[in-house]
Image (cartoon, rainbow, N blue to C red):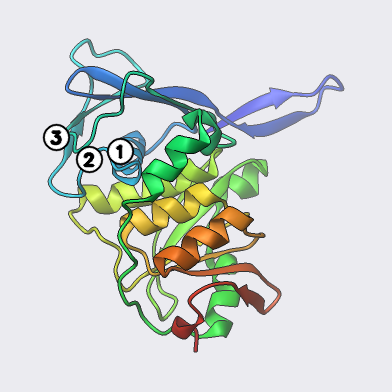
Amino acid sequence: MLHTAAHHDGVSDRVAIEEPLEIRVGGTALAVTMRTPGHDEELAVGFLVSEGLIAPGAVTTGPPADLAGNIVEVVAELVRSPDTRRFYATSSCGICGKGALEEVAVLAAPLPPTAAGPRVSRALLAGLPDRLVQPGFAATGGLHATGLFTPEGEVLLVREDVGRHNAMDKVIGRRGLDAALPLHGLVLCVSGRLSFELVQKAVVAGAPVLVGAGAPTSLAIALAAERGLTLAGFARRGRVNVYTAPERVA
């Protein structure tokens, strides 16, 4: 996850590693994403589930037949065709790798409404980013984090990555591998801003509440409102802004 790099002035820094990961289903490469190595099986499964390519049911992973590095083979049935374009996602932005705004609209259209979720206190939402355990960020300053919490604030799972969307995919993928999807009754928390793609992934995974330390985008708010997801941003210093579905916030 970490690499030591020297400045020109001779001082060394610890920096986050960024490498490509190829995701295959049935021997066919469906996606390449730039990521921080570690929890690669979770990332592969979470990506495929959150993109609506496989169902969040029984799924297994393993190395490819040729045992090549930086490749994960997922054993699952595709529920929709990724078409001939394939995915390429950068670590900074997954949505920009999808090519066309028309495809974003197509993917969002069939997403299910979010199930009725728990009541969460505003004070708890405001403090959740502070409960994210981020050793990679502490060492490098270059990693994003996603955490999964109970409505009472108990941390269930935290993952880090250079890509904010990858961090969430790793959380979703871990729950998928544990046959613990959807995320009904639980809260997702991200360390940065709230983009459309993060709302999309939260909705697909069935999470009723998504909170972030940063600002939401207009498209993120629109999708959250349409799907009944409670979206909260600017969670810091004991305050939080609730943008959609405020009925879940006590």
Q: Are marks 2 and 1 in contact (CB under 8 Å)?
A: yes
Which picture quadrant has residue 28? Answer: top left
Question: How far across and how far down the image is residue 2, in percent?
Answer: 56, 33
Q: Name the residue under label 3.
A: 77
Of the pair 80 and 37, the residue shown nearer to us: 80
- Disc 3/disc 1 C-alpha distance (Å): 11 Å
* 169, above or below 240, in the image: above
Of the pair 51 and 223, the residue shown nearer to us: 223
Residue at (23% x, 35% y) in the render: 80
Question: How far across and how far down the image is residue 50, in percent?
Answer: 34, 46
Question: How far across and how far down the image is residue 25, in percent?
Answer: 22, 26
- Amino acid bearing label 3: Glu
Judge the density around disc 2: few (<14), some (14-19), many (≥20) Cα neighbours within 10 Å.
Answer: many
Callout 2: SS: loop
- Amino acid bearing label 1: Leu
Q: Seen in the image, is 84 located left or right of residue 189?
A: left
Q: Which residue occupies the extreme right position in the image? A: 9
Residue at (69% x, 24% y) in the render: 5
- Disc 2/disc 1 C-alpha distance (Å): 6 Å
Looking at marks 2 and 1 on the same chain, the residue that comes earlier in the sequence is marked by 1
Residue at (50% x, 28% y) in the render: 99
Residue at (66% x, 34% y) in the render: 14
Q: Are marks 2 and 3 in contact (CB under 8 Å)?
A: yes
Question: How far across and how far down the image is residue 89, in percent?
Answer: 49, 29
- Disc 2/disc 3 C-alpha distance (Å): 6 Å
Q: Name the residue under label 1.
A: 48
Camera sees residue 250: yes
Q: Residue 54's mark?
A: 2
Callout 1: SS: helix
Q: Do the residues labelled 3 and 1 touch (CB within 8 Å)?
A: no
Q: Which residue occupies the extreme top position in the image? A: 66
Camera sees residue 194: no
